[in-house]
Image: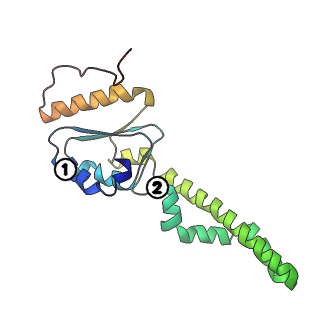
Amino acid sequence: MRMLQLEYGAEIGRAVVNFDGPIVFCVVSRYHGGAFVVFSKTLHDNMQVLAVEGSYASVIGGAPAAAVVFSGEVDQRTGSDPRIRAVERQVIEADDVTRARLRADLADLRAAVRSEKLGEVAGEFDGVHSIERAVKVGSVDRVIAANELRPQLIEAVEQGLRVSGGSDTGRLEQRTLIPEI
């Protein structure tokens, strides 16, 4: 399903809206783009969103944000980097033979520095758009430790069943999906 997420995003959203029962969504790594929209708590009254510690949440991830949304900032940082400025000065002051080599060096350096600046801006974006921020704005209900994943998911489903008036015949059984041999 992962490879078809864009193609079937609308159908997933419709299923979330029309589902009659509790929905528990757990972020285990990154919660971006379509997932952030489709699994929005505004689409279903009985949805709980949990996130494992260390997860990220935003409409767009840091790397795409740096490359697309903040490309001007990345370009400005690249152009003002002291390494770039130094080689640009050398190009201006060089003779014709040296200038050609320096321009090639500058192009290589600019690509390397731009890559560094993309990483910086991406890191800054991800630092601001943390999972803790998602909890503050209500997109995520709570952050859980990885070793608490199973009991927290069970509790969230049980809570959802109580809210929806579904049958709650006691605690859900904790079973493994892999049969014991």
- What is the x, y in percent for residue 103? 77, 77
Height in image: 120 above or below 85?
above
Question: At label 1, which amino acid type do we have?
Answer: Val
Residue for badge 2 = 61
Q: Residue at x 51, y 51 (%)?
A: 127
Q: Residue at x 80, y 77 (%)?
A: 89
Q: Residue at x 26, y 20 (%)?
A: 173
Residue for badge 1 = 17
Of 152 and 129, which appears nearest the observer?
A: 152
Question: At label 2, which amino acid type do we have?
Answer: Gly
The answer to whether residue 98 is seen in the rendering is yes
Q: Residues within 10 Å of mark 2 (few under 14, many from 20)?
A: some
- What is the x, y in percent for residue 113? 68, 64
Height in image: 7 above or below 95?
above
**Circle 2: element type:** loop
Q: Residue furthest bottom?
A: 96
Q: Residue at x 22, y 51 (%)?
A: 43
Q: Is residue 130 left or right of residue 153?
A: right
- What is the x, y in percent for residue 153? 31, 31
